[in-house]
Structure formats: C-alpha cells, structure tokens
Image: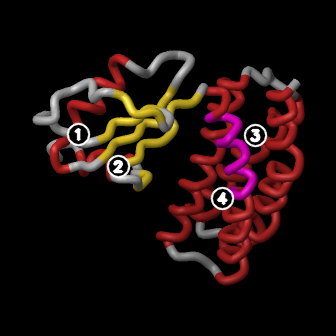
Amino acid sequence: MNHFLINGVEKPSPVASGEDFGTLMSYVTKNLISGNMLVSTIRVDGREISPRDEQDLQKVPLAKLESVEIIFAHPREIAHDTLQMLIFFTQRLMTISQDMGASGDTETEFLKLVDGVQTFSEAIQSASIVLRTGTQEEIRILGADLLSILDDIVGAKQAGNAAYLRELLSTHLPENLKLWGTEGIPLLIRSRDS
C-alpha cells in the first residue's frame, strides 16, 4: 500500500506493508473508532467498497493495494445522511409495493419488500436514537402503523387472503411510506437541527 489516508489526509500506515487488509481494518476498529467518530466510507484504490467487498479483501496483502482511505464522520452526521437517503428509499418501497399490489407477487419479491420495510423501520429507530430526537407522537404513530401494516401483510400472505394482501400492498403500505417521506423523516431531520 503506497497511500493510507484518513479523511483525505495522507498518514503513515499504522501496520506493516507485509500485513493484510484485515489486519489494517482490525487496527482501525480497535484504535481509531470512538463514540465521536465512526467509519463512514472505505475506499480501496479510489473505489468505495461495500461491507461485502471488505470481507472479500480481508486476506489481500496491503502490498497489492495502491491506496486505502478511511472516511470518518460523527454518528449524528451519519444518522442525518441516513435519514436523507431514507426519503428516497420510501419512494422505492412505495413503487415495489404498488407494483406487487397491482400485479401480484412472487415469493422473492414479497421477501424483498418485507426485508426492505424492516430495514427501513430499523434505520428510522437507529437514527432517532443517535439524534436523540425523543419520542414524538407523530413518529410513534407512523412507526406503530408501519409495523401493524407489515404484520397484516405477512398475515394475509400466510392466510392466502389475496384480496386483502393486494389492498395492503397497493394502498395502505404506500400511504404510510408517503407520510414517512413527506412528514415523518422531515420531522426527524428538523428535530436534529433544533
């Protein structure tokens, strides 16, 4: 590895060049991450990597890499960025749900939608905790409604109640997600800024 950067600033490598990428990441995790700074992005040879890529690179010798850059951010910044991305994610989930409601679903599509809604809900909860937005009535209602709709979707699917499932997918879930995108998430963002 010829270049090791932290937030765009070149630093001496904290591990020997004969070590592997996994050893470098272990060092970063143990010594550089704190309650005030978390890893936001990892770039290897100028390309942002995913958690899957990070796993695949574990045993790659650092000598085979040109550069590794670690971008740190405060947890509140990451939570704020997450909320911004969730606004767009609501649109994607709405489209998937409406398409499934109109044309039926395959088991794969159904599982992806359920997983997406669960991931969305968990991300909202995590961001709320990090941003310390408190328990706002509107957010509690939207969250409870979302989980109730998700339970109904799973129940209707298991019971084979196709008409109710179509109604949930084409109307109820998209309406809840729209409220998250236009009211719930913006409220959380404003709470963070106040």
Q: Position of residue 30 (x, y in %)?
A: 33, 19
The numbered mark, 2 or 4, whose residue comes first in the sequence reads 2
The numbered mark, 3 or 1, whose residue comes first in the sequence reads 1
Q: Which residues are magenta?
A: 78-89
* Disc number lying in front (2 or 3): 2
Asked if labels 3 and 2 touch by Cβ distance under 8 angstroms, the answer is: no
The numbered mark, 2 or 3, whose residue comes first in the sequence reads 2
Amino acid on which the number 1 mark rests in the picture: Phe
Q: Secondary structure at mark 1?
A: helix
* Disc number lying in front (2 or 4): 2
* Disc number lying in front (4 or 3): 3
Amino acid on which the number 4 mark rests in the picture: Ile
Which label number is shown at residue 44?
2
User: Residue at label 1?
Assistant: 21
Q: Residue at x 32, y 45 (%)?
A: 67
User: In the picture provided, is 168 more to the left or to the right than 49?
Assistant: right
In the image, residue 85 lies in the stretch drawn in magenta? yes
The numbered mark, 4 or 3, whose residue comes first in the sequence reads 3
